[in-house]
Image: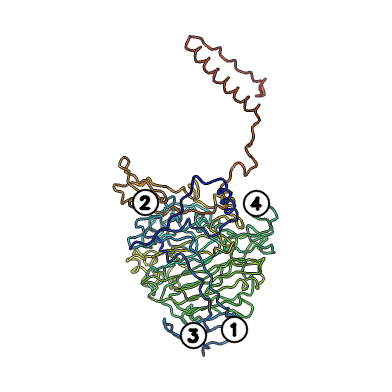
Amino acid sequence: MAPARRRPAARNAMASPLLVLLLGTVAHRAPTVDAGWIDPDTPEEAYTTWSLPAHAYHRPTSANCTNSTHGGHGKNCTNTTKFSPSSEPLTDSPTMAPTEQYVPREYKLVMSDEFNTPGRTFEDGSDPKWTSIHKNDYTNDAQHFYSRENAYTDGNGDLVIKTEAKDTEFIGFDDVHGKEVHATKHFRSAMVQSWNKFCFTGGVIEAEVELPGKANVGGLWPAFWLLGNLARHTYVASSAHVWPWSDSECNSKSMDAQLISGCSKALHWDMEPSVGRGSPEIDIFEVQPGPIKAGEGQLKYTYVGQPFMSASYQVAPGVPFNRPGPGTWPGPGQWYEGLIGGNESALNIVFYGSYNSIEGGTSNKNADYWADAISYNRQLHKEHFQRKHKYRVEWEVPDKENGNDGYLQWFLNDQLVLKINGTSLTDMGLGSEISSEPSYIIMNTAVSSQWGFPKCPTNCPCKKYNCHTTDYRQKCGLPTGFCDMMNETALYKVNYVRVYQDPNDPKQKVGCSTPERPTRKWIEGHEADYKQEGDAVPLKSIKTGGGSCSTSSQCGGSERGVCSDSSSVCECREGWTGPRCLSHAGYDDVKWDEPDSLSDVGFHPPTYFPAALVVGFAICVVMLVVGVIVKTRSAKKGYVPVPSVPSKINGHGHFA
């Protein structure tokens, strides 16, 4: 049986003025839950979800745990307990918060993509929700090129992100080092973004995902994450001193290091004065496969081994000094308190964040800053790479007026991975907070020598990595079994993505530029930071029809589009878009921030015209028409008009 379909309600063109006024009043009061982004293929039972309980799991005391310190970095602990799906729940946290009483909360669907239509592609201009970027990635020692061709929907109802060992030669601008480069990348993958198309602030996001590659072979970096709309990932200029700031106050650090800080008292780009802005990062998952077990190698002092997923909130400003060292447990006061971990989860002691400084150095060291990764790792198993599992985040936006600091909660198959209460951030006194930024969705698989690659072997340069070469120097640094795995192609498969919000919470909104956190004018005013050299605009307009076809089945079928007999191109029916009418024409029901009009710059056309002005205008029009008629008749009778006399110009170039 075909799933029930839900279509946008038709608009009544004959609505009375009173009804229009009432609707306008309702729109002004801003219903915050929208339906314009809901995929008609979404089953009715998925239109509602309820909050999940975020209960902590308590770790049994281990004989191998000690409170010894190494180099001032605090507690170090190891655990030889082996995990299995039925093993005793284990977790670790710097300080365990008290268990809160669970109060169910209802959320309604505001966006979904079921990916049921095969043949969808996501190149720029082809889809209203997603863009598959086509560019090199200069971040994180990336070994891949992101190709628009490597993201598509298959015949099984999945979005597929394909990663392969395939060469891409390109000439591009290296955003990190600020120069043109001619290079070849030996791996190709895809990144799908909803940047500046679909964004949301607060609510619930979940997806069913089958991870790419093999559980015990390192080298791939699949991720599912959210990023504030002010930064466009891989467009490095857009994120400089914007990522991952979430600090609305003015303090000594934000004054110099935060590009849009709360220290600014002027109103620019429609942004509120004295309100800091940025692009914090919520990692629903970053997965690291590989063969390293808990208690071994770089994971010697943690309870979670490879493969694992990292659930993270990356935020600035971070802890500026006395930070815990990589691979060691934090000492008292070194890290965020009150984090709540779930089953088979442990504090991520491998990565606590990154130090950010301007390329090439600067005399103003106050502009440098730490970005913290508040993160737990959750043990994964072979099954997560063989079939789909549900990954979910619940995001409560802070409400300072009512004393609510917000929270973030991560779940795998409805079981808690991590909860971060906003009080854990505010109690640190750094100014950072749970995100209030409208955020977009990213799904990608990277290949990075910083993620899941082995320690560089002796006599191996570890500069270039290539599976299709006989040169030992380009293969010796790759993870064991990686090239064999890539011969089979690694597929990241997504069954659906769904976003929910609480219709009774005015803080939760759909839109990339909201009244509380506008982004549109900033992006328009810094457009070059959000596009590649040669791009006319950051995002192309969405094509509706025009794709070549021979039958209507290539245009989504009779419900979505038809193939024109005369031109052999697709013509889309209402509600469907894309070159071949394969995508639902999603939209924001509430337009928080419409494009500028003349009224925005102070021009308002008159609503009343004096009678004399109207009569005078009419006389001018009549005289103009009569003059044209007379001139035409004169030309027909042989009259030659007197030539005009050119004006004289004096020696200084001015009219005499």
Across and down, in percent, residue 442 comes to 47, 61
Mark seen at residue 560:
2
Q: Nearer the viewer, residue 179 or 655?
A: 655
- Rate crowding at label 1 as few (under 14), some (14 to 19) or many (20 or more) other CA atoms within 10 Å: some
What amino acid type is highlighted by mark number 1? Thr
Height in image: 655 above or below 232?
Answer: above
Q: CA distance from mark 2 to mark 4?
A: 43 Å
What amino acid type is highlighted by mark number 2? Arg
Mark seen at residue 268:
4
Which of discs 1 and 3 lies nearer the camera? The answer is 3
SS under mark 4 = loop
Q: Residue at image x 41%, y 49%?
A: 574
Across and down, in percent, residue 587 comes to 48, 53
Q: Is residue 360 visible?
A: no
What amino acid type is highlighted by mark number 4? His
Which of discs 2 and 4 lies nearer the camera? The answer is 2
